[in-house]
Amino acid sequence: MAILKVGLLFGGNSGEHEVSINSAKAIFAALQEGENATKYEVKPFYIQKNGIWQGPQIANQVLTSGQVYQSDTPQNKWQFPSQVSEIEVWFPILHGPNGEDGTIQGLLTLMQVPFVGSGVLGSAVGMDKIAMKSAFAQVGLPQVKYMAVTRGQIWSNPCVFPKLCDEIEANLGYPCFIKPANLGSSVGISKAKNRNELEKALDDAAKYDSRIIVEAGVVAREVECAVLGNDKPKVSIIGEITFQSDFYDYETKYTDGKSQMIIPAELPDNVVREIQEMSVKAFTTLNCSGLSRVDFFYVESTGGILINEVNTLPGFTKFSMYPQLWAATGITFPNLVDQLIQLAMETYQNLATSDQ
């Protein structure tokens, strides 16, 4: 069997740059374990925060040190390292904007080389919270009440903004959550418990994105399901995130000891089945492929299940929820990355066949 050249693409122009480095370190190691070492030759590529691509020499230094690299040498952003032409399948692990929002997927599609994960459509809709919720509503997936607002409404004249806040209070009440539509890892998210907090949160969110979503607060447990596959996706057991902070913000998510994963989550069997079924429905609705983590609210007092969001490129260290869910379901980390590469090849071959 010929050894497949895998391009591990990480870093990126995103607030989740450092998270991407940690995910890449874990995947790089897994692709050199056991049978993977005989199947794959891994070439890492690092995208600096300013968008400049670096080849394996610099990328290996970043993986070894775990530190962000920034070159002061003038370079053209559109010039790729020469080793790019050798890659037979890409494994992008770029979290957040410019990584899981369809942009890099469009570039890799134009390169006509297979890549791990969803394509342009699934990635773009999966990243945009407003588009995602609209898609969920079309297929009847239950979710919290929400409103979509724009930066123009928030940064408007003194007559429009108060009316917007009045409408949010009337439709959603307090507490409510204010989120930029296109940022991941809880960046820019605030919880408002009164009018003053609402006004400040809307203004803060508008600094991150031109489109903002406001969601009604709900007393619920936060549970997650991992999906793996293409046309016939399979689901993992269910995990739960617990935390002591007011909500699952960036600091809570990425500070050791501030949150805890419970795998498997202690849930009734019928709730587990329903979450798994809803996960597949969300995955197929967004036209995802390869992998996704689907997040839910379980309202224990009523037994209700509300879908929160789909993450098409979730965190991928050995301690992240997505690989932990599969490990508990029976798929080891090295086997998981192997399956994802094989799924990428399958997707590309199916597309090539349909184009003939």
Image (cartoon, rainbow, N blue to C red):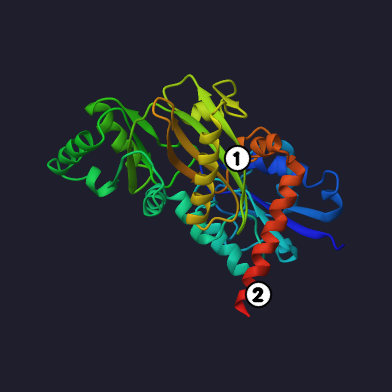
Query: In the rendered view, does 59 fall on the left or right side of 130?
Result: right
Q: Is residue 112 visible?
A: no
Query: In the rendered view, does 265 fall on the left or right side of 38?
Result: left
| Numbered circle sitting on residue 315 | 1
| Numbered circle sitting on residue 7 | none
Residue drawn at x 39%, y 28% as measured from the top left = 302
Q: Decide which of 337, 227 is in the foreground and name it.
A: 227
Are dots 2 and 1 in contact, CB under 8 Å? no
Q: Is residue 29 visible?
A: yes
Q: Secondary structure at mark 2?
A: helix
Residue drawn at x 60%, y 63% as measured from the top left = 108
Q: Decide which of 66, 102 is in the foreground and name it.
A: 102
Q: Position of residue 4 (x, y in %)?
A: 79, 60
- Residue at the bottom extreme? 356
Given the image, on which type of amino acid does mark 2 rest?
Answer: Thr
Given the image, on which type of amino acid does mark 1 rest?
Answer: Gly
* Quarter occupied by residue 83: bottom right
* Quarter occupied by residue 109: bottom right
Q: Position of residue 257 (x, y in %)?
A: 58, 20
Per the image, the residue denoted by label 2 is: 353
In which quadrant of the rendered image does the C terminus lie?
bottom right
Tell me if mark 2 has few (under 14), some (14-19) or many (20+) residues whose alpha carbon lies within 10 angstroms of its own: few
Query: In the rendered view, does 166 fall on the left or right side of 74?
Result: left
Q: Position of residue 168 (x, y in %)?
A: 23, 37
